[in-house]
């Protein structure tokens, strides 16, 4: 059998086509840091407007997570993935043709709309084509693609912009997206049976969930304190990673250290490498230990201490800044543990919508935190413009980065609270049953 007729080989072709789209998603969503000077110059915008422009992607991305989980469960990854690739590419074309801030804002929101369906669709594909004991590995590898996309969104993107300009570069990404959409449509099917292939041993049949069942799961999630704690963790910690690596990390280095954009983007490249390594590595460690919450708490504690270096010192040595960015990216692995925690708490029919709920909170954080930092920075403008970019004071950046540090500290507190609740439930379950009218010896 060849790669198209052997289901164990065909699944890699399907996953690979979705992974290419997810790679593009991560280039688009983290590109604002490298594009910041060009966008400020092209649209004559302030820091808060740049933050809002960046955030428009994440706001839409967050809003479509739960609907995507429902649609992917019912119709599979083929149509959702191919449609998402087309929509995000149309948005990218519109972004390059934008003549003003409003058009750019709406176009980036369209990119977010198409991008928002890809991760959940890819996980849904993995659930239908890979064994249960392979799913966690595939989730980690898929998440690692985010790190690879983040790498392309740093120095390679900066070099491409310097060589060809930002508009031709984004148009090229759009062209790749249209081609990838064709690949998804051609190679992805809902299941091996839907592709006319033999079933894969130990791959569970994924039945469609009715809208009534989904409504019941959503009601349960709404009243679940654990879900809210994990959503705050994802909002604060994932939102911070996206903000530092994808938005304000490069402008901070350009202003405070006087670096050019390409050199500054090499530091976010270090952070992207941390993302690429962190998600698969921490996932495997968590599986090996059989523990999710413990590594989550330890990782968020380390994340808080690491990030606090920037607001505490302002201009630490560049080698320290590189270490901070590396650990910020690596912390993605700890943050992603929130998803298997919520997934394992609910039955298989609810795992998609439960995961989508928490995942959406992270990208809502990716919309709110960069805008909040931009608002703070606008209060510390120097009046100077360098290479078309507005300059903000070091104190402004210290205060702005304190927002993300506090956010990660809040995530740490929520993870500790989650652990306390987990231990409380365990103690309750271990209590001997009282069958003698309340008397105990």
Image (cartoon, rainbow, N blue to C red):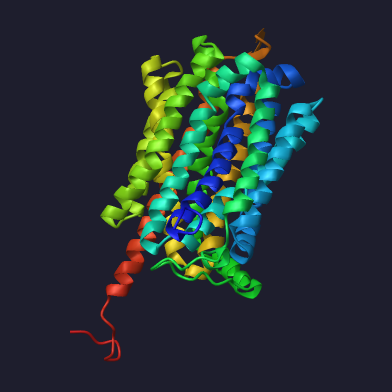
Q: Is residue 69 above or below residue 431?
A: above
On the image, which quarter does residue 167 sit in?
top right
Answer yes or no: is residue 103 visible: yes
Question: What percent of the width, then of the height, locates residue 337?
Answer: 41, 51
Q: Is residue 423 above or below residue 440?
A: above
Residue occupying the far left of the picture = 441
On the image, which quarter does residue 305 sit in?
top left
**What residue lies at 46% left-to-right and 18% top-to-bottom?**
314
Residue occupying the far bottom of the picture = 436
Question: What percent of the width, then of the height, locates residue 219?
Answer: 60, 69
Q: Is residue 174 above or below residue 383?
A: below
**185 or 133: which is nearer to us?**
185
142 left or right, relative to 372:
left
Count the numbered circles shown: 0
Question: What percent of the width, then of the height, locates residue 303?
Answer: 39, 36
**What residue lies at 38% left-to-right and 32% top-to-bottom?**
327
**155 or 407: which is nearer to us?**
155
Answer yes or no: is residue 60 visible: no
Question: What percent of the width, then of the height, locates residue 341?
Answer: 42, 58
Residue occupying the far front of the picture = 1
């Amino acid at each position: 059998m060849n790669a198209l007729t052997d289901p164990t080989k065909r699944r890699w072709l399907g996953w690979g086509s979705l992974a290419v789209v997810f790679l593009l998603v991560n280039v688009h969503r983290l590109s604002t840091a490298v594009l910041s000077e060009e966008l400020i110059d092209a649209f004559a915008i302030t820091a808060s407007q740049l933050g809002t422009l960046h955030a428009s992607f994440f706001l839409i991305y967050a809003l479509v997570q739960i609907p995507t989980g429902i649609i992917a469960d019912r119709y599979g990854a083929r149509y959702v993935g191919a449609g998402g690739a087309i929509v995000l590419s149309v948005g990218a074309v519109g972004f390059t043709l934008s003549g003003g801030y409003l058009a750019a804002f709406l176009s980036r929101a369209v990119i977010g709309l198409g991008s928002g369906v890809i991760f959940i669709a890819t996980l849904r594909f993995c659930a239908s084509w890979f064994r249960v004991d392979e799913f966690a590995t595939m989730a980690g590898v898929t998440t690692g693609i985010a790190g690879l996309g983040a790498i392309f969104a740093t120095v390679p993107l900066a070099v491409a912009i310097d060589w060809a300009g930002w508009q031709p570069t984004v148009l090229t990404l759009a062209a790749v997206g249209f081609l990838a959409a064709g690949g998804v449509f051609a190679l992805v099917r809902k299941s091996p049976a839907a592709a006319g292939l033999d079933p894969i041993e130990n791959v569970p049949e994924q039945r469609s969930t009715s809208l009534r069942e989904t409504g019941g799961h959503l009601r349960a999630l709404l009243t679940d304190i654990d879900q809210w704690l994990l959503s705050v963790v994802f909002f604060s910690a994932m939102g911070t990673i996206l903000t530092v690596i994808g938005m304000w990390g490069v402008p901070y280095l350009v202003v405070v250290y006087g670096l050019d954009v390409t050199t500054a983007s090499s530091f976010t490249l270090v952070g992207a490498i941390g993302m690429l390594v962190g998600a698969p590595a921490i996932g495997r460690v968590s599986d090996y230990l059989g523990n999710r919450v413990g590594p989550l708490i330890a990782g968020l504690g380390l994340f808080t201490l690491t990030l606090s270096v920037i607001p505490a010192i302002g201009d630490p040595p560049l080698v320290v800044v590189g270490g901070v960015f590396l650990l910020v990216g690596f912390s993605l692995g700890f943050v992603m543990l929130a998803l298997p925690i919520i997934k394992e708490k609910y039955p298989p029919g609810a795992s998609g919508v439960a995961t989508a709920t928490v995942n959406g909170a992270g990208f809502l954080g990716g919309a709110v935190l960069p805008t909040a930092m931009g608002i703070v920075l606008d209060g510390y403008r120097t009046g100077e413009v360098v290479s078309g970019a507005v300059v903000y004071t070091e104190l402004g950046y210290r205060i702005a980065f304190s927002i993300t540090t506090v956010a990660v500290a809040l995530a740490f507190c929520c993870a500790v609270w989650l652990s306390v609740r987990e231990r409380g439930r365990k103690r309750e379950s271990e209590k001997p049953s009282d069958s003698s009218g309340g008397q105990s010896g």
